[in-house]
Image: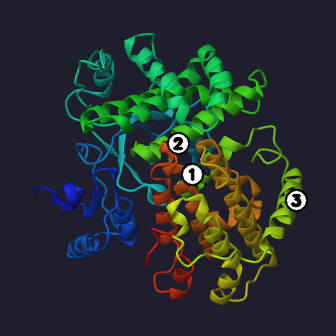
Amino acid sequence: MSPLRLGPNSLLEYSTRYKVLICLQCQYAIQKSALQSHLLRHKIYRDERQRLLDSIAQLELLEPDNVPLPNPDSPPIAALPIISGFRCIVAGCGNLCASEKRMRRHWSEKHGVGENSESLRRPVKLQTFFRGTKLRYFEVTPLGLGDAAGVSNFGSQMHDLDTATPIPPPHLSTPSQPFQPGINLETLTYFHHFTSSTISTLPDPDYWHTNIIPQALRSQWLMCGLLSITASHMSLLAEGLSIALVHRSRSTQFFSGFSAGWGKNMSAEIEEVEEEVKFSARRIRCIIKCTQWATSTPKVDEEDTLQSILTAIKDFVVPASSPLHPNSLQSNHNDTQKDSFTLATSILKIPPPTIPSSASPPHNNDPANLPILLSHLSTLPTRMTTVFSRPSSTHDVLSTLSAIAALIECSASSFASNSPTTIFWGMASWLTKVPERFLQMVEQGSLASMVVLAHWVVLVERAERRGCWFLKGVKEIVIEEVIGRCPVDDQGIWSLFADVRGIHN
């Protein structure tokens, strides 16, 4: 039976065999609890969204843990991307991993085997219905030509971007071997686009010019990172889906070359790699991760989506030598956090600013609306007190207050200028100012932390609208994660989101 298509432009596909609803643009299945927020992410509003939800309600949708998985000899599901991975061939195991790193961890934890155990695995092609915490890989057997042929012929398809119409590959797979770009018309075209266009859209373009580009010209893996970023940028600018898909696929291939170099050069034990190079690599990796969310590119070895977003953005701001970096000593981190809390809480004591009755909501991203945003944030602790029961941990209360205070400080920084770099730093620096305990609360799904995180999204959206194209979709992903962790029937909690656009019960 043919799949059932629903939504505007046939956005959704229902599999009658597996009882899942797949978003064809995002290339993964949507959980029932996330349907409403996912449709909002695609800008499907009110009446149209309700009609679509009513139609979907007539379908049988299985929970992720109950969805049957295809047999290994089954052909790929056309609506899902194919990923190169590995199967453990230890007797009675068969565990599937999308990266060598995960497979080595599996061998160590489950079989007590060291890293040099390549004979205990075989390469396979993988797919997954769901992402994030519900990710479950299954093996498939592609029909016809394998990936190697597709990759080897890719250069001829892209020989001349100006005159040729590229043919999109059948899927967006990541090659099992790291991609190594040669100096040809294709890579020169991508590099020219990076230096002439993409670089001016990135935070602190002068740093990219004076530091990262010279480093990339000396290190192929860093160059792969730059080419991956600019290929994603070109995919968003492309006219037509076929050309966009080619750029996305190329970005994935460049990323494989960057990832191989990352694994070899970013270990703490490797001292010959300069810290400045490692810091540049973290910045490149942050932008790549963001572009993958922006372009819906398949993400290999994806961990918790929300934590991945927060970690990537924080890594862009904080150099490894900083006491705020996750690998640094916690004592220095705590001292800095205490200073930040003392400074920011003084802002909380300022009376809420007077707001003109004609003022528009803060999400319009007009600096004139900063008083409105500060008013919402300064009254947020009081409003949260009326909703939440008596807290069991004073530490959690102080961490939440500190996060709100830091958000006020960062909002003022973000709205201080219309420069994309200033706006980005105002948004991203919040992650370096909140206490470590607050980030742990986010990881644990604390409702109080979800409320504060949702208000941070206002700064994320402002950055995207002011030119940070690589943040496209991050706001929607964070909101989707927040909604998924909040009880549907608790109207008190939902009232705290009233001033954040895109969050509705």
Quadrant (top left/top right/bottom left/bottom right) for the N terminus: bottom left
Q: CB atoms at circles 2 and 1 under 8 Å apart?
A: yes
- Residue 391 image position (x, y, % from top left): 73, 84
Disc 2 residue type (three-letter): Lys
* Residue on which the image places disc 1: 309
Residue lying at 76% horizontally and 56% vertically, measured from the top left: 433
Task: Judge the density around disc 3: few (<14), some (14-19), many (≥20) Cα neighbours within 10 Å.
Answer: few
Marker disc for residue 289: 2
Q: Earlier in the sequence, mark 1 or mark 3?
A: 1
Question: Residue 155, image x and y in percent?
Answer: 32, 17
The secondary structure type at the circle numbered 2 is: helix
- Give how far apart the Cα atoms at labels 2 and 1 are: 8 Å
The local secondary structure at tag 3 comes to: helix
Which of the marked residues, 2 or 3, is nearer the chain's N terminus?
2
Which residue is depicted at the point 35% across and 67% down?
66
Question: Please, which residue is most extreme toward the left here?
Answer: 1
Callout 2: few (<14), some (14-19), or many (20+) C-alpha neighbours within 10 Å?
many
- CA gap, disc 2 to disc 3? 31 Å
User: Is 143 placed above or below 38 here?
Assistant: above
Q: Position of residue 195 (x, y in %)?
A: 52, 22
Which mark, by number, is residue 339? 3
Please, what is the three-letter code of the amino acid marked with disc 1? Ile
Amino acid on which the number 3 mark rests in the picture: Asp
Mark 1, mark 3: which one is toward the viewer? Answer: 3
Per the model, the C-alpha gap separating discs 1 and 3 is: 25 Å
Compared with 285, 261 (above or below) is above
Residue 492 in sight: yes
**At numbered mark 1, what does the secondary structure look like: helix, strand or loop?**
helix
